[in-house]
Image: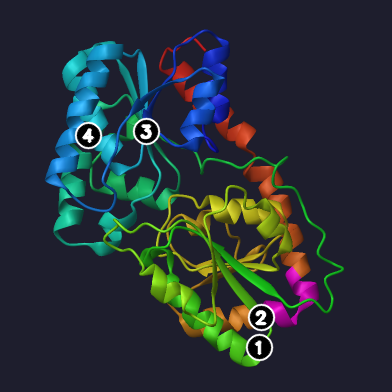
């Protein structure tokens, strides 16, 4: 919410609306509360079903609906979208406008099996009850339409959440001669972000370029069913783990390349942030990621999951500075033209206006 929706929240507050955040009580929600928003604390169990915590989350949503009787609600991520839509429509009927954003299909659709069928059923039941569902990439949008989980007339496509081009500005890396190359990844410490693949590529590249530094920045997620053992990860010689960063811009400024081996995304903010600073990206050609990497122009998209080719592409860019800088400049140009958070926020506000909200 803090990085992606702050501008929209501020616009509502400026016009005298009451804005209620339904999320965790942490440093980011606290900052938004200082701006004037209200906070209702709720916890969603990520990455799977949990009868106890899911029931509690649904009960809390019922209380919030009764307490605030909102004019418009906007949900992000799978469980809030499904549970929130069903609860709000049940409690408030047609008096509330419901907007959802599908930020990516994540664990449920990567894992497959029963959890995928449950998630599919949830979307099929909930999304037709919403006024609008926003998709961040063409693959997810097409999947939902093909499976008839949502009426086409109730959908919009807004690519990603955008990034602040003031905060993530272009970095000239032309004078980095003689410096050991730095390859970074930004993401939660779960296997579906490509932890195993990142480590294997690091091992292969460091065999050719021993001084290459591979750094992973992101929070651990021990309750996630796909979580990585932190002690094991920290013990690896080929990868350095630097944990969660409150500001990733300094790390990106020191890097030469973003290696992003995630299995599936909505639209990855990490790639957009890296591009804005002039970093090329090497990633798997998977939903969401292909929206923000232009093959051969801002980086490389590798067939899923071809570790050998990914390693070769990393070596190619580390050994060819001119090509790496050219791709980085192209990435920064793409970010300027397509990733500006101000344009994305404007698109979201236009969705609200089309639904009849006076803002």
Q: Is residue 303 visible?
A: no
For marks 1 and 4, the one nearer the N-term is 4
Tag of residue 4: none
**How far separated are the C-alphas under marks 3 and 4?**
11 Å
- The picture quadrant where one finds residue 121 is top left
Q: Pointer 4: residues within 10 angstroms few (<14), some, or many (20+)?
A: many
Q: How is the image coloured?
A: rainbow
* Residue wearing tag 4: 57
* Mark toward the start of the polypeptide (2 vs 4): 4
Marking on residue 23: 3
Specify the quadrant of the image occupied by residue 317: bottom right
In the orientation shown, which residue stands out farthest toward the bottom? 207
Tag 2–tag 1 contact (CB < 8 Å)? yes
**Residue at image x 70%, y 79%?**
318
Crowd class of label 3 (few under 14; some 14 to 19; many from 20; radius 10 Å): some
Task: Compare marks 3 and 1 and give the one earlier in the sequence.
Answer: 3
Which residue lies at the image location 49% right of the left edge and 23% below the top edge?
A: 33
Mark found first going from the N terminus, 2 or 3: 3
Using the image, determine if residue 42 lies above or below residue 208: above
Q: Which residues are magenta?
A: 317-324
Q: Label 2: which residue? A: 212
Q: Secondary structure at mark 3?
A: strand
């Amino acid at each position: 919410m803090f990085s992606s929706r702050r501008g929209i929240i501020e616009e509502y507050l400026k016009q005298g609306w009451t804005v209620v955040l339904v999320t965790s009580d942490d440093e980011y929600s606290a900052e938004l509360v200082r701006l004037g928003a209200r906070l209702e604390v709720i916890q969603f169990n990520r990455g799977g079903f949990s009868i106890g915590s899911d029931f509690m989350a649904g009960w809390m949503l019922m209380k919030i609906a009764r307490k605030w009787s909102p004019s418009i609600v906007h949900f992000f991520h799978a469980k809030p979208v499904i549970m929130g839509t069903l609860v709000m429509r049940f409690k408030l009927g047609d008096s509330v406008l419901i907007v959802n954003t599908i930020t990516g299909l994540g664990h449920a659709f990567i894992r497959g099996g029963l959890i995928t069928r449950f998630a599919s059923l949830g979307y099929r039941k909930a999304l037709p009850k919403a006024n609008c569902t926003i998709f961040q990439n063409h693959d997810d949008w097409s999947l939902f339409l093909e499976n008839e989980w949502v009426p086409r007339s109730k959908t919009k496509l807004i690519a990603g959440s955008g990034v602040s081009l003031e905060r993530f500005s272009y970095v000239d890396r032309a004078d980095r001669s003689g410096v050991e190359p730095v390859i970074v990844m930004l993401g939660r410490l779960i296997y579906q972000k490509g932890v195993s693949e990142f480590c294997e590529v690091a091992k292969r590249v460091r065999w050719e370029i021993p001084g290459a530094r591979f750094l992973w920045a992101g929070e651990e997620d021990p309750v996630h069913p796909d979580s990585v053992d932190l002690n094991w990860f920290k013990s690896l010689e080929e990868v350095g783990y630097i944990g969660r960063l409150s500001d990733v811009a300094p790390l990106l400024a020191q890097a030469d390349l973003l290696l992003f081996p995630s299995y599936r995304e909505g639209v990855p903010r990490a790639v957009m942030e890296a591009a804005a600073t002039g970093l090329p990206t090497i990633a798997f050609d998977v939903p969401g990621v292909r929206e923000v990497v232009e093959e051969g122009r801002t980086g490389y998209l590798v067939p899923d999951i071809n570790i050998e080719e990914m390693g070769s592409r990393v070596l190619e860019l580390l050994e060819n500075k001119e090509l790496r800088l050219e791709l980085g400049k192209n990435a920064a140009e793409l970010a300027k033209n397509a990733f500006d958070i101000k344009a994305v926020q404007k698109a979201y506000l236009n969705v609200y206006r089309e639904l009849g909200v006076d803002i």
